[in-house]
């Protein structure tokens, strides 16, 4: 983390079910529906403050490491330098994206992408997602591959979509059974792909 010498440092971070490219104004990712955020020492769920927390992000220092862990019981924990500050939220959905926003004295953070890390308190993993503005039916093969690559855990399957020349129209014909059987995706990933595709269909109607 890099700090500038004016005002207070402000870091807001947490998770959301919103597709990253849809968050045009992350600073009140706090205001986003389906979000679980830590702002200072206050917890925000779906845009509403629900209480305080033992970790205060406004007191984070240069080179400190913040972490988030979604536990197997669907609770969300925040970490500072590997120390678990306890349960912050319960009933967090299976698929969420990391969100980090910085303001004022905090002018830079480094986000460590550790998609394969399962250690508690691992740094937030952010996957950059493009803004797929066209209707999925109009996507070409490259756009479909970019879309698949943008979904956490799906990067290993991109080459299969490319080699099979799957464009948007073809993608819409696939269901989770096809993704599971032909592309050999785990069921959870297949459901996730279908869910993301449906969101883009609804968004671009």
Image (cartoon, grey):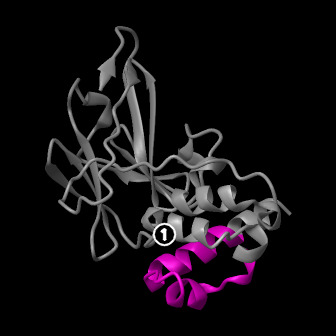
Residue drawn at x 15%, y 41% is 81
The N terminus sits in image quarter: top left
Quadrant of the rendered structure where residue 162 is?
bottom right
Image position of 180 (left or right of 74): right
Residue hosting label 1: 157
Return the residue nearer the eye: 59 or 103: 103
Q: Is residue 109 magenta?
A: no
In the displayed structure, would residue 77 be above or below residue 62? below
Q: Position of residue 34 (x, y in %)?
A: 55, 61
Name the one closer to the observer, 130 or 50. Answer: 130
**Of all residues shown, which one is farthest toward the front?**
163
Q: Which residues are magenta?
A: 172-198
Residue 75: x %, y % from top left: 32, 68
Report the residue that reaches farthest toward the top: 5
- Image: 49 above or below 69: above
Residue at x 52%, y 64% (from the top left corner):
158
Which image quarter: residue 191? bottom right
Q: State which quarter of the image contains the C terminus.
A: bottom right
Q: Main secondary structure of the magenta part?
A: helix
Residue at 36 percent of width and 69 percent of height: 90
Against 68, residue 10 (above or below) is above
Picture mark count: 1
SS at mark 1 in the image:
helix
Pick the residue in front: 197 or 4. Answer: 197
Q: Which residue is at the front of the view, 42 or 129? A: 129
- For residue 199, what is the image quadrant? bottom right
Please indicate whether residue 133 sits to the left or right of residue 54 in the image.
Answer: right
Q: Quick check: 83 above or below 39?
A: below
Q: Position of residue 165 (x, y in %)?
A: 67, 69
């Amino acid at each position: 983390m890099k700090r500038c010498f004016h005002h207070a440092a402000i870091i807001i971070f947490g998770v959301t079910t919103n597709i990253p490219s849809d968050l045009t104004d992350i600073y009140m990712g706090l205001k986003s529906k389906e979000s679980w955020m830590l702002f200072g020492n206050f917890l925000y769920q779906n845009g509403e403050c629900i209480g305080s927390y033992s970790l205060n992000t406004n007191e984070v220092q240069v080179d400190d490491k913040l972490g988030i862990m979604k536990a197997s019981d669907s609770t969300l924990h925040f970490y500072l330098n590997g120390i678990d500050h306890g349960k912050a939220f319960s009933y967090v959905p299976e698929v969420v994206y990391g969100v980090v926003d910085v303001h004022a004295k905090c002018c830079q953070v480094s986000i460590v992408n550790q998609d394969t890390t399962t250690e508690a308190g691992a740094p937030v993993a952010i996957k950059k997602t493009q803004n797929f503005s066209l209707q999925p039916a109009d996507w070409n093969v490259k756009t479909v591959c970019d879309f698949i690559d943008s979904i956490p855990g799906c990067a290993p399957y991109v080459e299969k979509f490319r080699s099979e020349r799957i464009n948007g129209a073809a993608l819409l014909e696939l269901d989770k059974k096809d993704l599971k059987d032909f592309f050999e995706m785990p069921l959870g990933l297949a459901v996730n792909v279908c869910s993301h595709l449906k969101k883009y269909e609804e968004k671009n109607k």
